[in-house]
Amino acid sequence: MAAPHFSIPVIDFSPFRSGSDPTRSDVARKVVSAFKEAGFMYVKNHGIAEATISKVFKESENFFALQDDVKDPLAWRDPRANRGYTKIGREQTTNANDPAEIAALREVAPDRKESFEIGLETDPEFRNYWPPEQLVPDFRSTMIHFYDACHNLHMDIMRAIALGLGMDESYFDSVVNEAWHTLRLLNYPPVERRLLEGEGQTRAGAHSGKAHHSNDLYFQSRPPIDYGSITLLFQDDIGGLEIQNPYTFEYVPAPPISGTIVVNVGDLLARWSNDLLRSTMHRVVAPTRTGGDERLAPTRQSIAFFCNPNEGATVDCLPGCEGSEGPKYPKVNSGEYLVMRLSATYD
């Protein structure tokens, strides 16, 4: 029997943002269908201005161009805060959960990227680590504005998911409204292609939002990194993102499409839906590039906005998602779960 067709759909979100009830419901059904089949979608007409996105990429580039003696004091320190700078090789995105195994993998196949995490600016307990304003004058204001815009889009997508699952559109509002998210700036510096050709070598290791589950019929392993509800991914024009076809286990390129955002299901949303919505393995590899020095994989930038339920939210099986065998997962507190997963990811 042939494997089902696999593709990442492009969904026009404008009818949901401004349309009538029938068109909103149609978009909601398309969103849920994409998340059931692929776990990913491209979204166009999403409401975040291209000028805003371009400004964020420019400010991200400015940050990563700073000297190490400026970036290093901003180092990521605490999984409860999940803020700050992560130098190349510190994070290991993998299917391993054991700290010793993750440490060994860092030695053999370190992730060849650096990142900077930004949380809710008004958080009463944890502060963001901002670089000196005189070095990057527009950085802080740009990121705060973008954070708010991404949160608003996240709320709309969660409403579409609720409607597409046959629930009231506002079902998730009270448990995802606190903007308890993480904005992550990512920089993949140029690297010799030969260094990416060894076993297990990628620019960011294969990962999904879904932790391994013994009843999983689709994946041999489910590495964790997209821990929350959904992820909004903004790509530059270099490419390198690949999605695993869940039927053949082959990786399929997810090239940048102008004017779109890549959106995928995270760990907690998969749990919430009892795996009805798919958390799909993905990775970043050296892109094929013509021109220039073919021995080097070029610089790549991306911006990820990891959307999370509220810190105190309880994630339990959604109505209508129980299936014939009932819920696969016990209830879990969102905040405790996210801290646990982050604690295992960094050294």
Image (cartoon, rainbow, N blue to C red):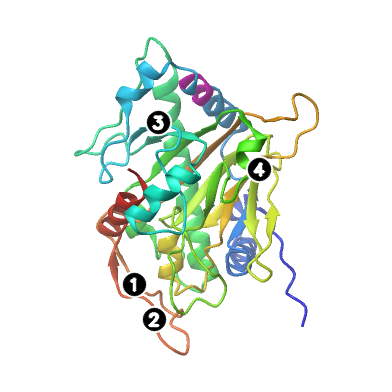
Mark sitting earlier along the chain (2/1): 1
How far, Cα to Cα, is label 3 from label 2?
38 Å
Identify the residue under disc 3: 144
Identify the residue under disc 2: 327
Residue 298, position in %: x, y? 66, 29
Name the element at disc 2. Answer: loop
How far, Cα to Cα, is label 3 from label 4?
27 Å
- The amino acid pointed to by label 3 is Ile
The structure residue drawn at horizontal position 58% and vertical position 40%, both measured from the top left corner, is 234
Mark sitting earlier along the chain (4/1): 4
Q: Viewer-nearest of labels 1 and 3?
A: 1
Identify the residue under disc 4: 240
Labels 2 and 1 touching (C-beta < 8 A): yes
Screen quadrant of the N terminus: bottom right
Residue 312, position in %: x, y? 24, 58
- The amino acid pointed to by label 1 is Asp
* Number of other residues with Cα within 10 Å of mark 3, as a class: few under 14, some 14 to 19, many 20 or more: some
- The amino acid pointed to by label 2 is Pro
Q: Is residue 292 left or right of residue 184?
A: right
Name the element at disc 4. Answer: loop
Residue 8, position in %: x, y? 68, 58
Labels 3 and 2 touching (C-beta < 8 A): no
